[in-house]
Image: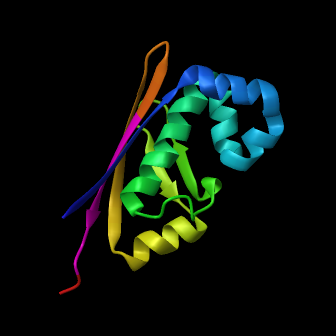
Amino acid sequence: MLVTGVDVIEIERISRILDQYKSRFLNKIYTPRELIYCNNRANQLSTRFAAKEAVMKALGTGTTVNWKDIEVTRNPGEAPQILLHGKAKMHAAKNNITNLSVSLSHSREFAIAVVVGEIHKQA
């Protein structure tokens, strides 16, 4: 069985929040590796924000997990990956959700993320 989550966000919204709250916003939402990769680029921050929201939807947690418990990583020449930490990792394990796959995209105005995971039922 599959679980899915999708989220779309206006890049301008993230840009405004970034201008207004800068490090307070960045340190609440993003991991140190994400911050290095994004380098304050609103489109990159937006796709990762959308990915975190999409993961929350796929896990069925709402916002009960910490933002930093969901991390989007990307190695050069590879597709982005989702790493779960803390409560998000525990929730996924408890519900047998594995193999989360993410697709990210953005235009000038919008960023979108789609997440698909597998539920492995116990025999």
Picture coordinates of residue 17, whole percent (x, y): 71, 30
Q: Main secondary structure of the magenta part?
A: strand
Residue 91 position, x and y percent, is 47, 72
Q: In the rendered view, would you say 65 is above or below 110?
A: below
Residue at image location 78% in from the left, 24% down from the top: 19
x 46%, y 27%: residue: 111
78 displayed left or right of 14: left
Residue 104 visible from this viewpoint: yes
Give the magenta part as a residue range.
113-121
Picture layout, residue 113 above or below residue 107 = below
Frontmost residue, 32 versus 114: 114
Q: Can you say whether 44 is above or below 57 in the image?
A: above
Where residue 55 appears, x then y in whole percent? 44, 52
Q: Nearer the viewer, residue 25 or 96?
A: 25
Note whether residue 74 is visible.
Answer: no
Residue 120 image-quadrant placement: bottom left
Is residue 118 highlighted in magenta? yes
Query: In the rendered view, does 1 fall on the left or right side of 33?
Result: left
How many discs mark residues in the rendered view? Answer: 0
Residue at the top extreme? 108
- Quadrant location of the N terminus in the rendered image: bottom left
**Splitting the image into 4 quarters, where does residue 60 fall?**
bottom left
Quadrant, the C terminus:
bottom left
How is the protein colored in the picture?
Answer: rainbow
- Residue 71 sits inside the magenta stretch: no
Q: At 56% across and 27% down in the image, what residue appears?
A: 44
Q: Residue at x 49, y 47 (%)?
A: 53
The answer to which image quadrant residue 103 occupies is top left
Residue closest to the far bottom: 123
